[in-house]
Amino acid sequence: MNKDVMWGIFVSEDIKRFPNFFPIGFYATREKAVEVIQGFPKNVNYDLLKLPLNRNFAYFHMKSGKLVGMDGIYHEHFHFKGEHESD
Protein backbone atom coordinates (compact mmCIF):
# COMPACT_ATOMS: atom_id res chain seq x y z
CA MET A 1 0.00 0.00 0.00
CA ASN A 2 1.32 3.42 -1.00
CA LYS A 3 0.71 5.80 1.92
CA ASP A 4 1.54 8.84 -0.21
CA VAL A 5 -1.68 8.56 -2.25
CA MET A 6 -5.38 8.01 -1.82
CA TRP A 7 -7.90 6.68 -4.31
CA GLY A 8 -10.92 8.93 -4.79
CA ILE A 9 -14.23 7.86 -6.30
CA PHE A 10 -16.20 10.59 -8.05
CA VAL A 11 -19.59 10.62 -9.76
CA SER A 12 -19.17 11.94 -13.32
CA GLU A 13 -21.71 14.34 -14.78
CA ASP A 14 -22.32 14.92 -18.48
CA ILE A 15 -21.32 18.58 -18.50
CA LYS A 16 -18.36 19.89 -20.47
CA ARG A 17 -16.88 22.31 -17.93
CA PHE A 18 -14.38 21.59 -15.15
CA PRO A 19 -15.08 20.22 -12.64
CA ASN A 20 -17.67 17.79 -13.95
CA PHE A 21 -17.59 15.37 -11.03
CA PHE A 22 -18.03 15.28 -7.27
CA PRO A 23 -16.39 13.06 -4.62
CA ILE A 24 -18.26 10.24 -2.92
CA GLY A 25 -15.51 8.16 -1.30
CA PHE A 26 -11.79 7.80 -0.63
CA TYR A 27 -9.84 4.57 -0.12
CA ALA A 28 -6.30 3.48 0.69
CA THR A 29 -6.05 1.00 -2.21
CA ARG A 30 -7.22 0.86 -5.83
CA GLU A 31 -8.56 -2.67 -5.29
CA LYS A 32 -10.92 -1.59 -2.51
CA ALA A 33 -12.11 1.44 -4.51
CA VAL A 34 -12.87 -0.69 -7.60
CA GLU A 35 -14.71 -3.21 -5.43
CA VAL A 36 -16.89 -0.41 -4.05
CA ILE A 37 -17.53 1.03 -7.54
CA GLN A 38 -18.74 -2.35 -8.79
CA GLY A 39 -21.44 -2.30 -6.08
CA PHE A 40 -22.72 1.20 -6.91
CA PRO A 41 -25.86 1.92 -8.95
CA LYS A 42 -25.18 1.72 -12.68
CA ASN A 43 -27.30 4.72 -13.72
CA VAL A 44 -24.34 7.12 -13.53
CA ASN A 45 -20.66 7.05 -14.46
CA TYR A 46 -17.77 7.09 -12.00
CA ASP A 47 -14.19 8.28 -12.11
CA LEU A 48 -11.38 6.86 -10.01
CA LEU A 49 -8.44 9.18 -9.35
CA LYS A 50 -5.13 8.37 -7.71
CA LEU A 51 -4.50 11.53 -5.70
CA PRO A 52 -1.11 12.36 -4.20
CA LEU A 53 -1.02 13.50 -0.59
CA ASN A 54 0.80 16.69 0.43
CA ARG A 55 1.19 17.84 -3.18
CA ASN A 56 -0.66 20.52 -5.12
CA PHE A 57 -1.83 19.12 -8.48
CA ALA A 58 -3.87 22.06 -9.72
CA TYR A 59 -3.30 23.10 -13.34
CA PHE A 60 -3.78 26.80 -14.07
CA HIS A 61 -4.06 28.34 -17.55
CA MET A 62 -0.83 30.24 -18.23
CA LYS A 63 -2.50 33.41 -19.62
CA SER A 64 -5.82 33.62 -17.78
CA GLY A 65 -4.68 32.16 -14.45
CA LYS A 66 -7.95 30.17 -14.23
CA LEU A 67 -8.01 26.67 -12.80
CA VAL A 68 -8.56 24.42 -15.80
CA GLY A 69 -7.64 20.95 -14.63
CA MET A 70 -5.42 18.65 -12.65
CA ASP A 71 -1.82 17.86 -13.54
CA GLY A 72 -0.18 14.46 -13.27
CA ILE A 73 -3.19 12.59 -11.89
CA TYR A 74 -3.84 8.92 -12.71
CA HIS A 75 -7.47 8.57 -13.83
CA GLU A 76 -9.81 5.70 -14.70
CA HIS A 77 -13.34 6.12 -16.04
CA PHE A 78 -16.08 3.58 -15.27
CA HIS A 79 -18.81 4.08 -17.87
CA PHE A 80 -22.10 2.54 -16.79
CA LYS A 81 -24.77 5.11 -17.67
CA GLY A 82 -26.91 3.97 -20.59
CA GLU A 83 -25.37 0.49 -20.80
CA HIS A 84 -27.93 -1.14 -18.53
CA GLU A 85 -31.02 0.77 -19.66
CA SER A 86 -33.51 -0.95 -21.94
CA ASP A 87 -34.25 0.71 -25.30
Image (cartoon, rainbow, N blue to C red):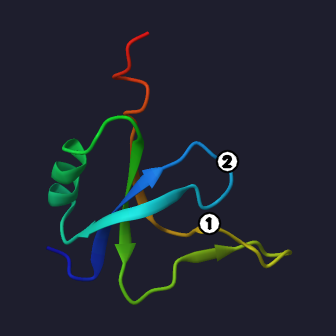
Residue situated furthest top in the rendering: 87
Circle 2 residue: 16
Badge 1 marks a residue whose secondary structure is strand
What amino acid is found at the position of numbered circle 1 in the picture?
A: Gly
Residue type pointed to by label 2:
Lys
- The quadrant of the image that shows the N terminus is bottom left
The C terminus appears in which quarter of the rendering?
A: top left
**Circle nearer the viewer, 2 or 1:** 2
Q: How many angstroms separate mark 2 from mark 1 (CA)?
A: 12 Å
Residue at image coords 39%, 48%: 46
Q: How crowded is mark 1: few (under 14 residues within 10 Å), some or many (20 or more)?
A: some
Q: Position of residue 84 (x, y in %)?
A: 33, 22
Mark toward the start of the polypeptide (2 vs 1): 2
Q: In this view, does 62 lie to the left or right of 8?
A: right
Q: In this view, does 28 lie above or below 75?
A: below
Q: Is residue 25 left or right of residue 85?
A: left
Q: In this view, does 57 lie to the left or right of 16?
A: left
Q: Are marks 2 and 1 in contact (CB under 8 Å)?
A: no
Could you say which is closer to the camera, residue 13 or residue 50?
13
Q: Quadrant of residue 8?
A: bottom left
Q: Nearer the viewer, residue 58 or 36?
A: 36
- Left or right: 66 with respect to 35? right
Residue at 58% x, 77% y: name it: 58
Picture coordinates of residue 44, whole percent (x, y)? 41, 40
Q: What element carries label 2?
A: loop
Image height of 70 relative to 76, above or below: below
Q: In this figure, which residue is indicated by the disc labeled 1?
A: 69
